[in-house]
Image: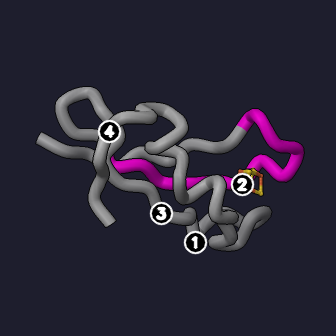
């Protein structure tokens, strides 16, 4: 079973808000949070590649 969660970056001062899809206790997809009034749907390339940084040897959905 998969479920979307809202979360945010803590390692960069921009603190963009992202949404992550978690399946079997693992993040499988990431997208910008368009409803966040601060980041307004912005997520940089690093943010969109958070799965790679979390699980460096894992493949993820596009
Ligand atoms: S998505 Fe990019 S700009 Fe936003 S907090 Fe993360 S690293 Fe910083």
Decide: few, some or many residues near mark 3? Use Cα within 10 Å; few <14, some 14-19, many ≥20.
some
Distance (Cα) linking label 4 and label 1:
26 Å
Residue marked by disc 2: 16
Label placed on residue 58: 4
Lower sequence index among marks 4 and 1: 1
Q: Is mark 4 within 8 Å of ligand 1?
A: no
Would you call the spot at circle 4 few (<14 residues within 10 Å), some (14-19), or many (20 or more)?
Answer: few
Image x and y of residue 37, in percent: 73, 66
- Cβ of mark 2 under 8 Å from ligand 1: the answer is yes
- Closest to the camera, between mark 2 and mark 4, is 4
Badge 2 density bin: few <14, some 14–19, many ≥20, Cα 10 Å: many
Q: CA distance from mark 2 to mark 4?
A: 23 Å
Are circles 3 and 2 on residues that touch, CB within 8 Å? Answer: no
Residue in the image at 44% along x and 56% along y: 30
Give the colour scheme of this rendering.
Answer: one colour
Residue situated furthest right in the rendering: 13
**Residue 25 vertical position relative to residue 17 in the rendered view, above or below:** above
- Give SS at disc 1: loop
Q: Which stretch is magenta?
A: 10-21
Q: 11 left or right of 57?
A: right
- Label drawn at residue 34: 1
Q: Secondary structure at mark 2?
A: loop
Q: On the rendered structure, is 16 left or right of 55? A: right
The residue to which callout 3 is attached is 31
Ligand 1 under 8 Å from disc 3 Cβ: no
Q: Residue at horizontal 53%, vertical 53%?
A: 49
């Amino acid at each position: 079973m998969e479920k979307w969660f809202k979360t945010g970056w803590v390692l960069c001062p921009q603190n963009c808000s992202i949404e992550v899809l978690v399946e079997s206790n693992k993040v499988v997809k990431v997208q910008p949070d368009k409803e966040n009034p601060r980041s307004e749907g912005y997520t940089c390339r690093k943010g969109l590649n958070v799965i790679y940084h979390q699980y460096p040897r894992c493949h993820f959905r596009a």
